Amino acid sequence: MDRTPMALSERVWKPILKRISLFILFLPLAGCGNLLYLSHLGWHQSFITFQSVPIEEVLQREDLGEEEKEKILFIREVKRFGEERLGLKRSKNYTKFYEAKGPPLYIITASEKDRLLPYYWRFPIVGEVTYKGFFTLEGVIKEKLFLERMGLDTYVQGVGAYSTLGWLKDPIFSTMLQWDLPTLTNIILHEMAHGTIYFKGETDFNEQLATFIGNQGTIEFLKEKFGESSKELNLAKDYQHDDLLFSDWIEQAYEHLSNFYAQPLSREEKLEKRGEVFRFIQNRLRERKDRFRTEGYRDFDRGRINNAVILAHRRYLYRMDRFEILYESLGREMKKLIHFFEEVKRSGEKPGLYLERWMKERKITSPSSLR
């Protein structure tokens, strides 16, 4: 694993790129502080849009291998499955192709150093978000240094795909063709979920819901396409096994850090002693290292961790059980789950509270609070 502070190596971001999504809206509604940033995003997104070519042209290219062409056609199948079988919103996404030279985006997460409190960025339409995206490494490094001068922990990740929430046609990035089929299926369905359901100012809930839809939808698609005993389905199940194992560690790390920061210590004492807490947390991960079935998380214990690292990963993996319980109560029909959250959105209520109340009214038990 890359031991640099940014931790941008593939080993770090590969497990997370399956579920990361960045919401980019280029509207001249922000204050002066955001206008330059949004203009920067707008310029780069416009470049991507104008440089993207129809996939029909790409499929005729002689310099593109047969495996890559098959994956483009595979994406079409996944998209169709998501729309027709899962009830995800129909769109013209993934009808064009963009040749990317590296991760299409970098995102940064920040947190207070003496407590698990994420730094929030505020934008029009999407509301508060707990990460910020950049198209260039230079841009994200500049933001990283700015946040660290404010005394915050930071964490930078390379991102393999993102959603514009239906405002633009999201292309197939060339880097996506490097992924195996379970990962490719997952990210497409995850991003389609964002384009279907989005709750303003609920970054973590949006990501967790899309993670569940992506994970479960991947299992359903691969089972139907390749069969119950296929290597593709088994690999998808291994990925989900590792996600659950890692999320359990993340939750224990979060609770351990929360208890530490709640102690009656000065800020200086907390900053001095927290290194020992991080080492303890990493040792706990090493103890379960042999239980991982894939390579994604096996070297995670070698990298530098801080509050932002914990919050960034928890954003996608917290409380997956609540969605599983809801899914079961709806007869394991994804269309019903999609319709459920469309009703939640129309209600205007916070989604976590709505889900908790709905379950209580029907006496559906859950092991812990859904908030």
Image (tube, rainbow, N blue to C red):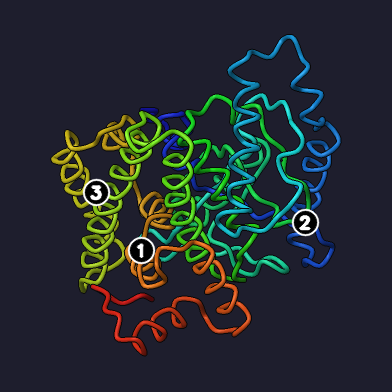
Give the label on residue 278, or none: 3
Q: Nearer the viewer, residue 292 or 284?
A: 292
The quadrant of the rendering that contains the N terminus is top left
User: What is the crowding at mark 3: few (fewer than 14 residues within 10 Å), some, or many (at least 20)?
Assistant: some
Label 2 amino acid?
Trp
- Point out the residue furthest to the left here: 287
Tell which tag, 3 or 1, sits nearer the viewer: 1
Q: Residue at x 20, y 71 (%)?
A: 263
Mark 3 to mark 1: distance in Å? Answer: 31 Å
Say which quarter of the image contains residue 49.
top right
* Residue displayed at 41% across by 66% down: 117
- Check disc 2 and report the residue beneath it: 167
Q: Give the distance between the C-alpha atoms of the residues marked 3 and 2, in whole angstroms.
A: 41 Å
Q: Amino acid at mark 1?
A: Glu
Residue 185 place in picture, x, y as percent: 52, 40
Quadrant that contains the C terminus: bottom left
Q: Nearer the viewer, residue 199 or 61?
A: 61
For residue 324, which numbered disc appears in the image? 1
**Tag 2 or tag 3, which sits nearer the N-term?**
2
Spatial CA distance of label 2 from label 1 is: 30 Å
- x, y percent for residue 79: 63, 44
Q: Nearer the viewer, mark 3 or mark 2?
A: 2
Percent of width and height locating residue 288: 16, 41
Question: Mark 3 and 1 residues: CB-CB less than 8 Å, in contact?
Answer: no
Residue density around tag 2, few if under 14, some if 14–19, many if 20 or more, within 10 Å: few
The location of residue 189, given as percent across then percent down, is 55, 48
